[in-house]
Amino acid sequence: GENVEQHPSTLSVQEGDSAVIKCTYSDSASNYFPWYKQELGKRPQLIIDIRSNVGEKKDQRIAVTLNKTAKHFSLHITETQPEDSAVYFCAASTGGANSKLTFGKGITLSVRP
Amino acid sequence: DGGITQSPKYLFRKEGQNVTLSCEQNLNHDAMYWYRQDPGQGLRLIYYSQIVNDFQKGDIAEGYSVSREKKESFPLTVTSAQKNPTAFYLCASSIMISTDTQYFGPGTRLTVL
């Protein structure tokens, strides 16, 4: 089955700097890659996703890049703010019938004011 | 994701007792899921259901049971066979199993004393 790994497990950046969180996956058939943000004590919420037919997607300060050859995808946050502090989960799915999302273990991002 | 509710928010039970966690959605989604979240472990899939009266085991189904008698409801029972039931439980739904974008409920924190 699919295996999704995130590195590092924690990341600390200064407010205003950029943050990059990387995920690797094992199943070359995976074609859907979402990113979820979970603030302390709250539910995970989808912040951006990408499908395998594109290499990059942007939404304001957030972008995701996908390298299918290397089987990794990354979340980029520019001009970080304290409210970006949260746990970020990446996931992967093949997208077909009976497909299911496989999540990474999450990365805790801390933005220092 | 405001259309997915879980109750109760906190639940305490004695060891050896079965307990049922509620999950309701009014989003008209066909697919529903149960995840378990432990610190540093990410989101692990317990059970999922693609349609009413159908469900499949996820990665950690042992000690859990579900039912899907109505489209809106997907209750999870944590049985006494679950060796380490104390955790944060998240319910999610998506339009169909293949569309993948999942919307999460607020979660139930179960503590077994």
Image (tube, coloured by chain):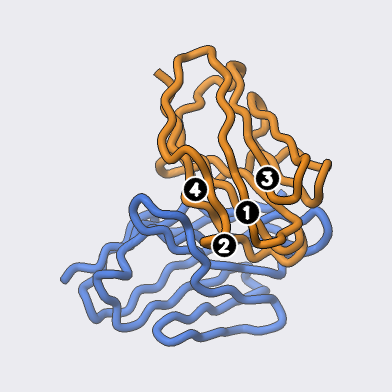
Chain colours: A blue, B orange
Report the residue at 58% width, 55% height from top: A4
The tag earlier along the polypeptide, 1 or 3, is 1
Question: Dot 3, how many residues are within 10 Å of its Cα: few (below 14), some (14-19), or many (20+)?
Answer: some
Q: How many marks?
A: 4
Q: Chain of mark 1?
A: B
Question: Residue B5: where, in percent of width, then height?
Answer: 54, 50
The tag earlier along the polypeptide, 1 or 4, is 1
Write down the residue under mark 4. Answer: B42
Q: Amino acid at mark 3?
A: Ser
Q: Is residue B39 above or below residue B105?
A: above
Write down the residue under mark 3. Answer: B73
| Closer-to-camera residue (A73/B15) | B15
Question: Dot 2, how many residues are within 10 Å of its Cα: few (below 14), some (14-19), or many (20+)?
Answer: many
Q: Which mark is residue A24?
A: 2
Question: Residue B109: where, in percent of width, then height?
Answer: 43, 37
Q: Amino acid at mark 4?
A: Gly
Marks 3 and 2, Cα distance to the nearest angstrom? 34 Å
Q: Is residue A27 above or below residue A75?
A: above
Report the residue at 45% width, 20% height from top: B13
Write down the residue under mark 1. Answer: B25
The tag earlier along the polypeptide, 3 or 4, is 4
Marks 4 and 2, Cα distance to the nearest angstrom? 15 Å
Please identify, in this view, whether the residue under mark 2 or under mark 1 is nearer the observer: 1
- Quadrant where the image shows the N terminus of chain B: bottom right
Local SS, label 3: loop
Marks 1 and 4, Cα distance to the nearest angstrom? 23 Å
Mark 3 and mark 2 residues within 8 Å of each other at the beta carbon: no
Question: Dot 4, how many residues are within 10 Å of its Cα: few (below 14), some (14-19), or many (20+)?
Answer: many
Local SS, label 2: strand
Report the residue at 71% width, 60% height from top: B29
- The answer to which image quadrant residue B10 occupies is top left
